[in-house]
Amino acid sequence: MSKLFFYSVVKRFVVALIIAGSCFNVIHAEALDKQAMEKRLSIAYIASDLTIPFWEIVSRGIRYTAMDLGHDVVIYDANNNVKSELEHTVKAINGRVDGIIIFPETSASCTMVLNLAREAGIPVVIADIGTDSGEYVSYISSDNEQGTYDIGRVLVSNLHKLGWAEGEVGIIAIPQKRLNGQARTAGFMKAMIEGGIASVDIKQMKTFSQQETYDYSAELINHYPNLRAIWLQTSHTVPSALNAISDLGKKGQVAVIAFDAEPEFPDMIDRGVILGSAMQQPYLMGQEALLVLDCHLKGESVEKHKQLPILSISKKNLTEKLSLIQKTVLGL
């Protein structure tokens, strides 16, 4: 075999390897691109009201988790309005999202959202409030009944220590047509009954405004001379309750205890401005909702109902729980 013939054969072999390698790289790159495209999902988050810190913190849990997974999130704000909630659902469906995460206005309105999504073939994860009926992938909730029972016991203990066991408690509640509202009231009332504390009235929020809470607080104080505590089933209107107590000359005579948390709550609890709060973990809730939807869209099985614990925080355990509060409750 001549050298010339040998080099010719080798050259053709090397060229063939290069071509084959190039083809493999192209095919491999195309496969990776296709795989990346298949994994990148578009998720709609329909929030109840982003002006309330709880829902904004939930959005952080959803957005940052989606970012880690390489997904896109479109956020809609229903502004505490059922009509807007349904309009946003239609927008999300028309936008051909892969899945929807919703924190519904009411358990009744959630049924309508689920029906629209089912007709469009879009899976839905519900969080917090729940639904009266309909098909959904998973329901991520907080253990409202246990959480409010625990914070109710904190209130009972404090009222006894203050010598106010004969006093009365008023409640400013979220709408009781919501399943989570019903659970919150049930847990708290159980603690009051066990502790021998009288609950005299319950006011249901409609606008969730500062003025509404101020007016309700003033009404409770004026109508019940033996009132010793106000429990708010929210957190953002706590300043209004405190203002009403102060304006009506009841500072130091009527205590406030809350549900959920604001960034200033740890300091307020530490200084005794409020006795404590049953804190949901909204960042964790948003994170879990996104992860569950991601697993479902990948064909994996998921829990139908996942309950997250509520942190019952008072001065007694504030220091111990502070780092957890900052991360999963306040989303810091």
Image: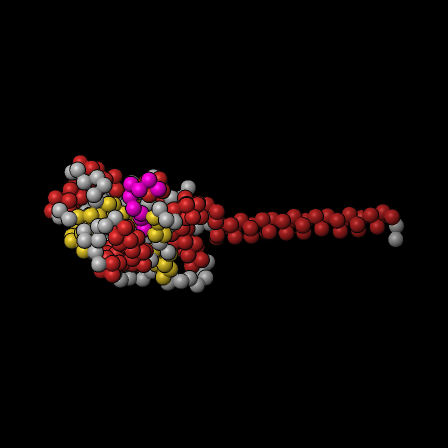
Residue located farthest toward the top when viewing the structure as drawn = 247
Residue at image x 44%, y 58%? 295
Percent position of residue 11, x then y: 77, 47
Residue sitting nearer the eye, 108 or 193? 193
Residue sitting nearer the eye, 184 or 266? 266
Residue sitting nearer the eye, 193 or 202? 193
Q: Is residue 125 visible?
A: no
Q: How is the image coloured?
A: secondary structure
Residue at image x 80%, y 51%? 9
Q: Quadrant of the C terminus?
A: top left
Q: Is residue 276 visible?
A: yes
Percent position of residue 13, x then y: 75, 51
User: Which quadrant of the view contains residue 110?
Assistant: bottom left
Q: Is residue 272 magenta?
A: yes
* Left or right placement of residue 5 versus residue 106 in this view: right
Residue sitting nearer the eye, 107 or 247? 247
Start-end of magenta stretch: 270-278
* Left or right placement of residue 220 versus residue 332 in this view: left
Q: Is residue 5 magenta?
A: no
User: Which quadrant of the view contains residue 114?
Assistant: bottom left
Residue at image x 29%, y 43%? 274
Percent position of residue 123, x then y: 36, 57
